[in-house]
Image (spheres, grey):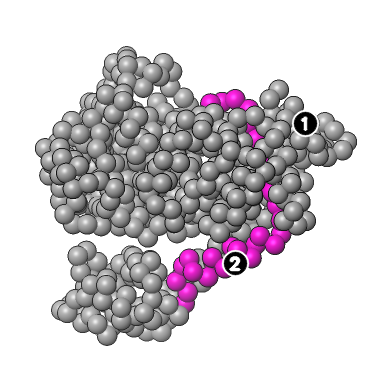
Amino acid sequence: MSCTWLSSVGRDPQHSNAPKALNWDRLRKKAQAFFGIDELRPGQKEMIETVMKGKNALGVMPTGAGKSLCYQLPALFLPKATIVVTPLLSLMHDQTHKLEEAGVETAHLDSTLTRLEEQRAVKAVKNGQKALVYVTPERLENPEYLELLKKGGVSLLVVDEAHCVSQWGHDFRPAYLGIRKVIEAFGNPPVLALTATATPQVEKDILEQLNLKNVKVCHTGVDRKNLVFEVYRTVNAETKFQRLLELIHHNEGTGIVYVSTVKLANELHTQLLKAGIIAAKYHGKMRMKEREVIQDDFMANRYRVIVATKAFGLGIDKPDVRFVIHYTFPDSVESYYQEAGRAGRDGKKALAALLYRLEDKRVHSFFLGGKYPNRSDAALVYSTLLKVTQLGSQTSSLEEVVKAAGIVKRKVQVLLAYLEKEKVIQHHKVIRLKKIFTDGHDLDRFLNHYEERLGQDRSRIKEIMKYGQTTECRATFFRDYFAEKHGEICRKCDNCRGKFLNPKPVESGNELQKMVVS
């Protein structure tokens, strides 16, 4: 584990409501009373101490390392609310339910609330009656909600799943780019950014996008010593499905099977049911209520397996998942490591398997074309702004630009964020043109950013394919990717067993099970 202070260009916290000397005995008693925790894990003490003293912090801590406690415990002591920006409703509901059971005053503001529920939540937040308030980044784009949270007061702003801030990251969301303006609107309170995975490039981008200065950065390391990492190469769809059945039959407990598309989730779910597996499916096109029921049933072990897209699992604290199997390889090593890390959160041995087939790359190549604006999109949005917005006077709205440019809203949001970063526009409630590119060179420099982004996406896909094909220790592969010390081999992944412990590759599910449960 390593913790360092970084001084970068950005904003310092402008206020601190916490004591400079901490009463750790009191903190530990609260941790035990509310969360049943007797001992802090690596990194938790450092993060808690930093935010309690009113400083900015970034925690890069793997799944299961206890990131939530780093803000939930301070929230019990801070005089005003801790605002938690989180990307998924399922995560938000899971966290608030557990906190309410523990007796912590909590609220969540999202689209699932009834009118009466929302009115009650709004009143409580406005009056400062909630210690923790969970909100999606999209909700913070609404000026009314922003003003509401300001009135209640903010002692700490938490950016959960902070890799979503970074366009270099694996799960970028445009609404996260607006958080830097939210921080300013709240009067620059201390900020705690948390993520399970971040390369040095992503880490740097998180701090730049949030405009943070004097940040304590804490890495607890990517190693998950209780996980057994495996890759199985499959030549066709039939072989792949048979391997999946073997892994499910030879591993006890519940598990998650990740797929890359909604179509495949539906098809695979049907196949598993026909094979006699008690399975459910979960993806973003299902109704919210249906997803909530399935999630609750899975948490209660009513299903053996859940077949899901990446929409499932972020922040869901089910400690006894015994296996996570990727039926198709994901879009990056970061995505894979975060999703695989949902196995074995209880510290007991668990399986993280990837069923690798080269042909699966086609799906990612298709998605890649729609993720970021390309060079022509960027040029079109800029020229549209010149037409609908006059320098220093006439303004326009996001909707006007989207309609005039004929480009999807997500791409326009990304481009506007970069134009604002370049100080070409000011974007709050309306878009105001502040300057124009003076020559073709400046415009080319701006447009080249998007070709770079696309190149980085392609590079990440190549890296996860490299993982699927490598013969080296999988633990050292992850350490090298996330720029940690190479370290010693794990001696338990499929590659290590094949090289050092067994002259023949492990093919039998029974042999694999012995490794996992021993």
Q: Does 48 appear above or below 90?
A: above
Q: Please provide the residue range marked out in magenta.
A: 346-375
In the image, is 278 to the left or to the right of 132? right
Q: Quadrant of residue 381?
A: bottom left
Q: Residue 133's x, y, as percent? A: 25, 39
Q: Residue furthest right?
A: 503
Name the residue beneath numbered marker 2: 365
- Residue type at mark 1 is Asn
Q: Residue 38's x, y, as percent? A: 41, 16
State the residue in front, 218 or 322.
Answer: 322
On whether residue 367 falls in the magenta region, the answer is yes
Q: Is residue 210 visible?
A: yes
In the image, is 95 to the left or to the right of 153? right
State the residue in front, 410 or 224.
Answer: 410
Q: Does 406 appear above or below 449?
A: below
Q: Is residue 491 visible?
A: no
Q: How many marks?
A: 2
Q: Secondary structure at mark 1?
A: helix
Name the residue beneath numbered marker 1: 510
Residue found 47% across the figure and 77% down from its top: 375
The answer to whether the residue labelled 1 contacts the one labelled 2, judged by CB atoms less than 8 Å apart, is: no
In the image, is 248 to the left or to the right of 189? right
